[in-house]
Image (cartoon, rainbow, N blue to C red):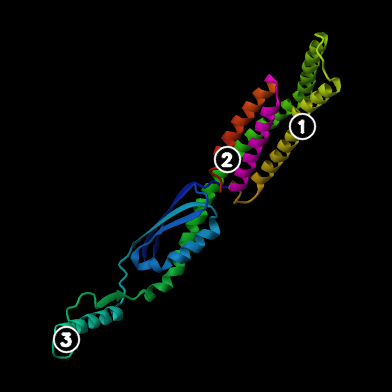
Amino acid sequence: MIKSMTGIATLEKELPLGKINLEIRTLNSRYLETNIRLPKRIFALEERIRKVIRTYISRGRVDLVMKLDSNFALEMKLEPDLKLARDYINAMNILKKELKLKGNLRIEHFIGLNDLIKAKENDKELEPYYNDIIFLVEELLKSINKMREKEGEYLASDIIKRVGKIEEDLKEIEKRKDDMIKGYQKRLEKRVKELLTNDLEVDKMRLYMEIAFLAERSDINEEIVRMYSHISQLKDMIKKAPPIGRNMDFLVQEMNREINTIGAKASDVIITKKVVEIKGELEKIREQIQNIE
């Protein structure tokens, strides 16, 4: 069954690590876009969360925000920035050489230099809690998918109703097409007789060939058959699992082309009216499809 691309869900849970607050919003997008905002101390989970999102959502923009209220104290450790230390040494050696300074560099010369030694939290202490957090993210994704599926049911219902209206209008066009061609031929024949009674020199064979050619050009049977085929495909797509939004959008574009051709070929007021009505329904369907995963 189809799913909407829009939804929102929240989740709050107390874990040994602290209180986790999760919020997810999904919006329309041509492809899958994930924007994840995590607390600094569990930033290492970002890629794992991104992979989990891809297993539940295949299309749309996903904004996930996680907040952590925790008094969990991590062990601190001091780490030297070796690259920065080498840069300092190189800079000092250049000064020594250019200014012709004497003496050797000693460890006390590095005391007080900015950012040379940094205190970092030991992130490995958080790893035992990562699976609990991922489990919560999955619960959140299941929750938002239920909402998106519910919205998808409404979208499917509306699309099916509009497809039914298109099918009814197409049947009216199909009933009318034979009368349209007969009327077209009668008008041509009447005009030909008028020309012949005026003693104009007319190549009758060429004239009747032209009549046949024009009648063939006004035949809309092939377009009607293709429209019925597209309608059948659209009905089948609605029953399939997502992602189907882009395929549905392409199919509606094809239906628009067929109905435009029918409108261009038909010289009948009733058919023209039905064409306009079908195009209106197709536009409404296309608007709904923009929200389908």
**In-front residue for pair 66/169:** 169
Say above or below: 76 vs 214. below
What secondary structure do most residues of the magenta stretch adopt?
Answer: helix
Circle 1 sits on which residue?
Answer: 221
Discs 3/2, front: 3
- Residue 108, disc: 3
| Three-letter amino acid code of the residue under disc 1 | Asn
> Which residue is outermost to the right?
205
Q: Residue at x 29, y 81 (%)?
A: 82
**In-front residue for pair 108/118:** 108
* Relative side of 141 to 123, left or right: right
Circle 2 sits on which residue?
Answer: 155
> Could you say whether the residue bearing mark 1 is in a helix, strand or loop?
helix
> Could you say whether the residue bearing mark 3 is in a helix, strand or loop?
helix
Q: Residue at x 53, y 59 (%)?
A: 54
Q: Residue at x 82, y 9 (%)?
A: 199
* N-terminal-most mark, 2 or 1: 2
> What segment is highlighted magenta in the picture?
246-269
Q: CA distance from mark 3 to mark 2?
A: 72 Å
* N-terminal-most mark, 1 or 3: 3
Q: CA distance from mark 1 to mark 3?
A: 93 Å
Res 75 → quadrant? bottom left
Magenta run includes residue 199 = no
